[in-house]
Image (cartoon, grey):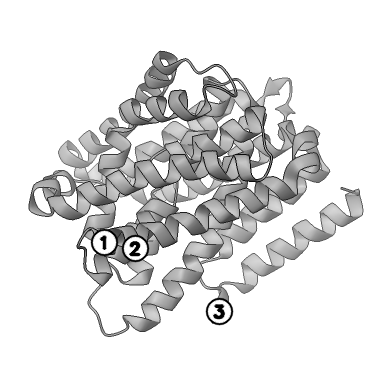
Amino acid sequence: MPPLAGITLSFLFIALAVASRSVRVMKGLGFTFVVLATGAGALTFPAAFISWGGFELKFAITPLVQVILLGMGLTLTLDDFRRVFTMPRGVVFCCVLHYTIMPLGGFCFAQLFGLHGAVATGLVLIGSVPSGTSSNVISLLARVNVPLSVTVTAVSTLISPVVTPFAMKWLAGAEVPIDAGAMMFSILKMVIVPLLIGLSVQRFLPGIAQRLVRVLPYVAMFAICTIIGVTIALSREQLLSVGLAVFAAAACHNATGYVLGYWGGRLCGLNKTDARTCALEVGIQNGGMATGLAFNVLQSPAAALGAAVFGPWSAITSSTLASWWSRQNRNSPT
């Protein structure tokens, strides 16, 4: 991308981020525009996102993902896990739909759009990780079943050390070598440990947890921007050559998650509100975790491209969906 075009695009996205604070139709999209500005900057000036003072920024990805998951743990309570027993039908069906629709969707759309190797593996990877914490915020905005959303996110994250490596080995093993044991260990270290630490702090040191919760969302935003910027900078050539195909595959993947998540929930007997919650839990993925696994286990920036494209796009589509459902549920309790 020419420098002038990249700079112009970055400033345009920053202007949109500022405008989103006062323009109603763009509410909730401010951070997405910041991410897009970061992506445009990484495409234009990749060196700025590869190393600082001799330190390779890719080595910061795992700690940044751990900070994000620590923040998630700080927002959870034991009640979020007890709800597995009070609303088992919704939790089980949402988790099953999530871990069948999204991994298979990643595989199918990679094949459909002619993607191969690490790039195709990245689409399977973004489909094989648990639902993202942003789904809880989107569920709140959409006025659907927030307790169900939080519990599904927590449960899908806790079972990911087993389910994610299995799905990757089964669906992506033909594209690149998959070490399921190494992936399981990486998930435990990168995701489960900080999640449990955050949960413990919330349980035993609530005062500290409350102070941290005020700060960590901003740290998490910085972390996500950094992760996406580093990914795009390191895989810039692949993105320029197959970017349209990756975007089309990610967009179809995301839409399929919403549609099959909703109708799958309805077929499983969930009411309309819970089925909408299921749609969000299926269609929104933990992009930070996928990126961390792409760098740590697969050792491939190209495998992180799926997450770098899927994340911002799903933020736009889920915010739009939440706005639509919120208007329909205006008189419903949040």
Q: Residue furthest left?
A: 86
Q: Amino acid at mark 1?
A: Leu
Q: Amino acid at mark 3?
A: Val
* Tag in front: 1 or 3: 1
Marks 3 and 2 close (CB-CB < 8 Å): no
Q: Decide which of 112, 213 is in the foreground and name it.
A: 112
Q: Is residue 233 above or below residue 113?
A: above
Disc 1 to disc 2, C-alpha distance: 6 Å
| Residue ID at (60%, 40%) | 110
Query: Which type of secondary structure does the marked residue at label 2 adopt?
Result: helix
Query: Which type of secondary structure does the marked residue at label 3 adopt?
Result: helix
Q: Decide which of 239, 211 is in the foreground and name it.
A: 239
Left or right, 84 with respect to 116, comes to left
What residue did someone put label 1 on?
A: 267
Marks 1 and 2 close (CB-CB < 8 Å): yes
Could you classify mark 3 by the number of other residues whose Cα lies within 10 Å: few (under 14), some (14-19), or many (20 or more)? few
| Residue ID at (50%, 70%) | 320
The location of residue 151, given as percent across then percent down, is 23, 49
Could you classify mark 1 by the number of other residues whose Cα lies within 10 Å: few (under 14), some (14-19), or many (20 or more)? few
The location of residue 3, given as percent across then percent down, is 89, 49
Q: Amino acid at mark 2?
A: Trp
| Residue ID at (34%, 23%) | 188
The location of residue 297, given as percent across then percent down, is 52, 20
Query: Which type of secondary structure does the marked residue at label 1 adopt?
Result: helix
What residue did someone put label 3 on?
A: 25
Disc 1 to disc 3, C-alpha distance: 33 Å
Marks 1 and 3 close (CB-CB < 8 Å): no
What residue did someone put label 2 on?
A: 263
